[in-house]
Amino acid sequence: MTSNDLPPNAYRLPRTNQLEGLMTIIRDKNTSKGEFIFYSDRIIRLLIEEGLNQLPTIPKHITTETGEPYDGVGFEGKVCGVSILRAGEAMESALRECLRSVRIGKVLVQRNEQTGEAHLYYAKLPEDIHNRFVLLLDPMLATGGSAIRAIDVLLSKGVKQDKIVFLNVLSAPEGLRVMNEKYPKMKIITGWVDRQLDERNYIVPGLGDFGDRYF
Ligand code: PRP
Ligand code: URA
């Protein structure tokens, strides 16, 4: 897979001028922390809206202020967010801006700086997570190791693969391929797909360590 074609379970945000400009700012090594936070938050908001678009709706009949009937839709099903700490926490406030009292679970996974291997330290999830759609939040998908640790916790709690939508700002073709092989029924929405991983398993051209730049 190159950065131009995607596995069938992955969707990339449209390459608008706005998105390209925002990505350019957060990739720039001269961008300050404040600007990095501000412009990442704008991209994250686009991802959250697109993630919510994947959730089902049911027909809803209402009467408008003019007294006319209107056949619209209502939101269906329970939802929660699960952030992969630390960097995934950066995506929680945009989710809360869209779903005011959304339940949020957390999974702490850290990559070994030398080997890139991911280790699961902690998970705290809503009790009834098996009855919910899960928006899984992590800005970076590199090898996929961290996401695998987190998704396997969700599956062990009874969450169905096809009820998980994984949202990330930037991904590598390697990580997308692994996600498709292991979890073909899970949807992935990514802001941008970069060229490849380097020898330290960083995404290139990339933006560096998202967590270090945001927090
Ligand atoms: C970063 C990032 C992802 C992971 C992606 O986390 O937030 O969780 O790396 O890489 P992978 O796909 O190869 O697993 P990191 O472990 O650096 O921790 P952080 O969130 O504290 O920055
Ligand atoms: N995690 C990051 O924050 N950046 C990368 O390039 C890869 C993993």
Image: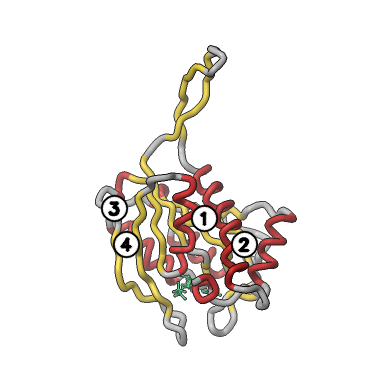
Question: Farthest residue in the right direction?
Answer: 17
- What residue is disc 3 on? 126
Mark 4 or mark 2: which comes first in sequence?
2
Closest to the camera, between mark 3 and mark 4, is: 3
- Point out the tag, 1 or 3, that comes first from the N-terminus: 3
Q: Position of residue 62 (x, y in %)?
A: 48, 19
Q: Label 3 to label 4, Cα distance in Å?
A: 12 Å
Sequence-first tag of 4 and 1: 4
* Disc 2 residue lies near ligand 2 with CB under 8 A: no
For the point 59% across and 74% down, which residue is it? Answer: 203
Image vertical order of residue 46 relative to residue 121, above or below = above
Rounded to the nearest angstrom, the CA distance separating label 2 from label 3 is 30 Å
Is mark 1 in CB contact (under 8 Å) with mark 3?
no
Residue at mark 1 to residue at mark 2: CA–CA distance: 21 Å
Which residue is the site of mark 4?
A: 153
* Residue count near mark 1 (Cα–Cα under 10 Å), binned few <14, some 14–19, many ≥20: many
The spot of residue 110 in percent (x, y) is: 40, 75
